[in-house]
Amino acid sequence: MDPVEQMYHENILDHYKHPHNFGKMDNASVHHHEYNPLCGDRIEMFIRVEDGRIADVRFAGKGCAISQASASMLTDAAKGKALAEAEQLTKDSILEMLGITLTPIRLKCALLSLDTLKNSIHIYRAYVAKQGDATSDHAHTGERNG
Ligand code: FES
């Protein structure tokens, strides 16, 4: 493994062992969970929206190093962003953060957190549109098959 690849691997392991933004949130505007049907691993995400921005985001779950590290990195990236900006995060954003090449199966692991984030925002928007009030809502859903 070359030194750059080694560095990315160590970074992934560090996020896995010491995940950022890990835990639940009492005052989330939306929370939602997804799972990877190939292995059953899960990610639950909690997002607090204020003035159209992600004021705070946390995640909980269990899974492999790639799924948990990508959730840690993605929540770092999403925090403080406007919802529309967070929606621009893509598969390539995740791959860039991870910095390693992934097999299709591992890609599914990496994208679990992105699917959870995107679907959480989607659910939040749908909930707010229905309520006609963007500030005092809590949208909560059941799980969707990732
Ligand atoms: Fe389950 Fe990676 S092996 S998400």
Image: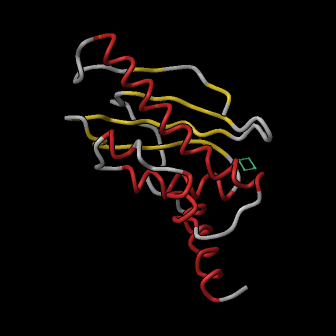
Nearer to me, 29 or 89: 89
Q: Where is residue 35 in the image (x, y as percent from the top left)?
A: 67, 35
Q: Which color mode does the image show? A: secondary structure
Which of the 4 image quarters holds residue 36? top right
Q: In this view, does 103 lie to the left or right of 122?
A: right
Which residue is located at x 61 percent, y 47 percent?
Answer: 111
Q: Residue at x 76, y 35 (%)?
A: 37
Is residue 5 rendered to the left or right of residue 47? right
Tag count: 0
- Determine the image quadrant of residue 25: top left
Q: Position of residue 60 (x, y in %)?
A: 54, 42
Taking the spot 33% from the left edge, 39% from the top edge, the residue there is 83
Residue positioned most to the left: 51
Give x and y (percent) for residue 33. 57, 31
User: Residue 59 placed where, x, y %?
Assistant: 49, 43
- In the picture, the quarter occupied by the C terminus is top right
Residue in the image at 56% along x and 52% along y = 91
Task: Between residue 15 and residue 119, name the one nearer to us.
Answer: 119
In the rendered image, the vertical position of residue 127 relative to residue 1, given as above or below: above
In this view, 114 is above or below 8: above
Question: Is 128 placed above or below 59 here?
Answer: above
| Residue 52 drawn above or below residue 85 | above
Classify the position of the N terminus by image quarter: bottom right
